[in-house]
Image (cartoon, rainbow, N blue to C red):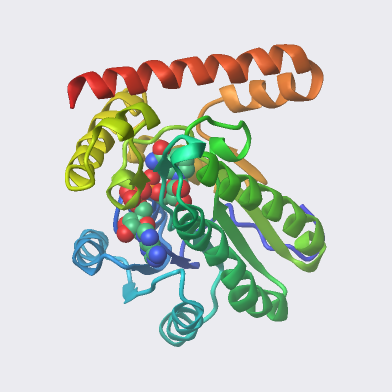
């Protein structure tokens, strides 16, 4: 451990702020960390689901506060930090978890798709650095955790906007680590593989170009909705449950790992990427083919 850094192995009575906690990974992390005895400030834009998570946590006898926070709004992030400190006191840990996904071929993506995803997945963390980091630095301690993705380590086809946002989150986390680690702040980036969450609810998916040509403007929303459902069903078949994944992430959080993975395949991919360029290119092309198959199956079912 670096001199001056406080161990996070014992989480009991430490204070956590987490975004996007109403569902999926955020919900499971919040409940898992509550079981470790942390006091929680949970936030999301989906208040109905957030209140249910609050009830689940209260049933464990844990102190928990909630607030609506749209992470794409700087004022909301500022307000979150303000109320969280008012209610909890010091913020020992922050998890920037809120995020959305996508699914579209590059040529069918609209500029607003890029903007929307970068706002939620990347700018939210930039806001958080502006708001929460100075608070932690002043105190000389804290654990700053971002949710990246396996798609921030290995490029994925049909998710260019998502990959762009998550590669940025991984790079930003690494750079932040090197800047603040000796100032008492831990930085971690969680890199989930595929997790069976509700991520597709808020994600924009575009139907493939060949189908786009044969669908009228009036039919498009319905077709895209059904394609999204079938695409995610097929894509997430081999995914982990959020509960199982969160258990792994909490282990990594306790060990203050910089990179937190749920499957070792990402470590293997990094090794191949670094050492065997032509094999890595084959891996990427294979992924492209697998996506084509998933899309074909999804299209058959709509
Ligand atoms: N599910 C996966 O396969 C997967 C894979 C890699 C990374 N991730 C990442 O994990 C994180 C959590 O996603 P999840 O899979 O649990 O999805 P999820 O949709 O189940 O949960 C995400 C939560 O974020 C909230 N949210 C969305 N936009 C928001 C905004 N503007 N402000 C505040 N909250 C907002 C949603 O309401 C939701 O409750 C995301 O950052 C996602 O990119 C997910």
Image point (51%, 38%), residue name: 106
Q: Is residue 58 left or right of residue 253?
A: left
Which quadrant of the view contains residue 61? bottom left
- Residue drawn where x is 45% and y is 16% of the image: 290
Count how many numbered circles sit on residues in the image.
Answer: 0
Dividing the image into 4 quarters, which one contains the C terminus?
Answer: top left
Q: Residue 147: percent from the left, percent from the top? A: 52, 50
* Between 251 and 70, the one nearer to me in the picture: 70
Looking at the image, is 292 positioned above or below residue 43? above
In the drawing, does residue 219 fall left or right of residue 41? left
Residue depicted at x 71% and y 75% = 137
* Residue 201, horizontal then vertical, whole percent: 27, 49
Relative to 25, is 67 above or below?
below
Measuring from the top left, give residue 18's x and y in whole percent: 44, 64
Expressed as whole percent of the image width and height from the top left, the position of residue 71 reads 45, 69
> Looking at the image, can residue 25 be seen?
no
User: Which of these two is toward me, 114 or 196?
Assistant: 114
Give left or right: position of 11 versus 236.
right
In the rendered image, the vertical position of residue 71 relative to residue 247, given as above or below: below
In the figure, residue 195 lies in which quadrant? Answer: top left
**52 displayed left or right of 20:** left
């Amino acid at each position: 451990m670096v001199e001056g850094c406080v161990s996070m192995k014992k989480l009991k009575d430490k204070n956590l702020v987490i975004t996007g906690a109403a569902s999926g990974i955020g919900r499971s992390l919040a409940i898992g960390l509550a079981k470790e005895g942390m006091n929680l400030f949970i936030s999301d834009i989906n208040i109905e689901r957030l209140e249910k998570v609050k009830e689940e946590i209260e049933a464990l006898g844990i102190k928990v506060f909630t607030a609506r926070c749209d992470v794409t709004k700087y004022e909301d992030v500022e307000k979150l930090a303000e109320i969280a400190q008012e209610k909890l006191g010091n913020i020992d840990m922050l998890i920037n978890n809120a995020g959305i996904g996508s699914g579209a071929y590059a040529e069918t993506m609209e500029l607003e798709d890029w903007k929307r995803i970068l706002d939620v997945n990347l700018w939210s963390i930039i806001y958080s650095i502006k708001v929460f980091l100075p608070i932690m630095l002043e105190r000389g301690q804290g654990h700053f955790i971002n949710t990246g993705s396996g798609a921030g380590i290995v490029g994925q086809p049909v998710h260019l906007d998502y990959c762009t946002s998550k590669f940025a989150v991984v790079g930003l986390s690494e750079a932040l680590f090197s800047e603040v680690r000796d100032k008492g702040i831990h930085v971690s980036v969680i890199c989930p593989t595929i997790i069976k969450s509700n991520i597709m609810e808020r994600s924009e998916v575009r139907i493939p170009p060949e189908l786009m040509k044969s669908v009228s403007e009036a039919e498009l929303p319905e077709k895209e909705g059904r394609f999204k459902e079938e695409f995610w069903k097929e894509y997430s078949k081999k995914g982990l449950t959020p509960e199982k994944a969160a258990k792994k992430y909490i282990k990594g959080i306790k060990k203050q790992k910089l990179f937190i993975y749920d499957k070792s395949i990402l470590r293997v991919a990094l090794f191949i990427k670094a050492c065997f360029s032509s094999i890595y290119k084959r891996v990427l092309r294979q992924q492209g083919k697998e996506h084509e198959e998933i899309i074909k199956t999804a299209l058959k079912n709509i």
